[in-house]
Image (spheres, rainbow, N blue to C red):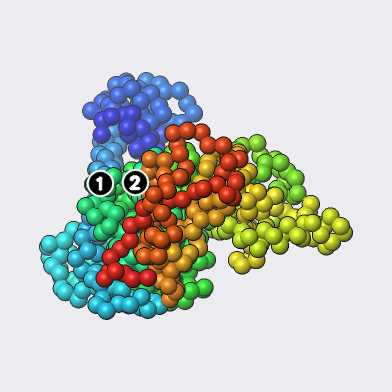
Amino acid sequence: PRDASADSSFFAQAASKIGPSSARDLGGGMEPLQMGPRFGKYKVDPHITHVESNQPARPLVAGTRAGLALSRRSESLIQHLLAEKATMKEHRVSGKEAAREMLRLLQKHFKPIDGYDYAYHKPSHAWSSKILSRDDHYQPQLAPSGTAPQRRGTRCNAIQLFRSLLYELATEATEYLKGDEMMLELPSPCYVLGDLHGNYKDLCWFASSVWRMGVDMCPARLLFLGDYVDRGPHGVETIAYLLALKILHPSRVFLLRGNHELEAQNGGALYGDRSLKAQCIQLYGGHKKKGTALWETFNACFDWLPLAATIDGRVFCCHGGLPRALYGEPSRGLRASYDSRSILERIAAIPRPLSEEAVDGDGDPRKDFVALDLLWADPATANEEAQYALMEKISTTGGVFDAEQRPLGPGFFPNATRGGNTVVFGNEAVSRWCASTGLSHLIRAHQPPELGIEFSKGARIITVFSSSHYCGGHNSAAIVLVSEGMLRVATTSQETSALMSPSRETTYVVEKEVDPAELACEEQPISFTAVARRSSHDMHS
């Protein structure tokens, strides 16, 4: 605590609480608390203790009775603030303890249900009703707002202990997320997972197959592409597991934001009892006030999630797709003013916390919608591209579709499926993206392919989905490994191995330069390496 360089902001806070009048009369009483060459942003030595803002520091007369009295009070206040800071540091350590306890609790007391067959919205796991002694468990130091702290030695069941950890877990995870950039730059090897949507069973399979011995023993980083909640039966447990991993392994686990990490999506209006908000309320036995407070805590955490990542400077990752603001010229009404920054610089410069209003651009069609597209955009199907190409051709002969007034750049079209201000992007947009950024592939999530993995636009766009049997369907789950210049795919489907021959290994290569023009060729032979799949007794397609 005597290190002024480490504690400058803290002691500046102390100075503000003392006030200029008290600081002016501290006298010699401050001498035992000298902290080095700086006191916040003000100079300090044994004879200069005046810290009033916007005035030069000046010597004070020490030893007066009033000065000594104020000195004792000020010294007591600073000692109190030192103790408060020590408590905060202790709380930071306890955050990791809470994360370890959360993982242990989920593993030991959140058990799979026998005979689970992936029926839509039926739970795959259930909490144990065993009574636990709190003497044997971690004690959260800060109780949730409005609740009484649990006394050590009291007894509770597993779900009560789970609830008591969630607030501290979300608050602590927020601090770690603040340390990440809006656009992460990661080296390979890196596992990339798509939507989970509360599918805790599949998350457990990935954990037992990919990081079975623990994240610290896993040879690759873990990158999750968002949509952790809603629709599935265990959204709260799924996000609790991931936040615990982030706290314990902040440099190896990375969480991106999906469109379901927005209040409008997970707030219950669209998905009812399958929403995160409804599941938070159910967790508290239907107590709406407590459940809503937990839901708000989670969304405050989500506002700090990054939107994108690059791997090896060649593979771009996000939840949705390419932003229409790729084009810098202010043509076609794309935006009100010209921005000379590259599209990657603009993504990295998006401020946080990122509110839902900022994502939507307040509905203003002149906005860039960079965040919106990263969360919502989809690759255009061949039929969509052909349809819009025909409409543009008709417009040149006097048709009603005026491409010059369309508020989108070349290769971007309105998303008829999702509506609103969302878009789809075609081959022209992908080619322009690769040429302008030097990136060769986009790994995204947001859509559930039948086999859990799908390739489009000359295999430059890879869609990965990591929740099987989504919404009662029969899709598989998948994971992508980016390593050694290759994209390797693991999936729960037994059919995928027949589609991807292990003998052909032509993917992106980081050791040599790749001409984006070559990547635009639809006939380029691109295939992927050997496929791993889960055992048939654990999961069948």
Quadrant of residue 470 within the rendered picture? bottom left
Q: Residue at x 28, y 73 (%)?
A: 125
- Measured from the top left, where is residue 206 in percent x and y? 31, 59
Give coordinates of residue 45: x percent, y percent.
32, 21
- Tell me if 516 is positioned left or right of 57 in this view: right
The residue under label 2 is 221
Residues 490 and 238: in front is 490
Q: Is residue 417 above or below residue 184?
A: below
Residue 367, visible in the rendered structure: no
Comparing 185 with 532, the one in front is 532
Residue at horizontal 47%, vertical 42%?
Answer: 508
Which image quadrant: the N terminus?
top left
Q: Position of residue 496 (x, y in %)?
A: 41, 61
Residue at 43% x, 62% y is: 452
330 left or right of 41 in image:
right
- Seen from the viewer's position, the closer of residues 511 and 409 is 511
Residue at 55% across, 55% down:
456
Q: Nearer the viewer, residue 311 or 163?
A: 311
In the image, is residue 2 above or below residue 366?
above
Residue 489: mark in rendering: none
The residue under label 1 is 216
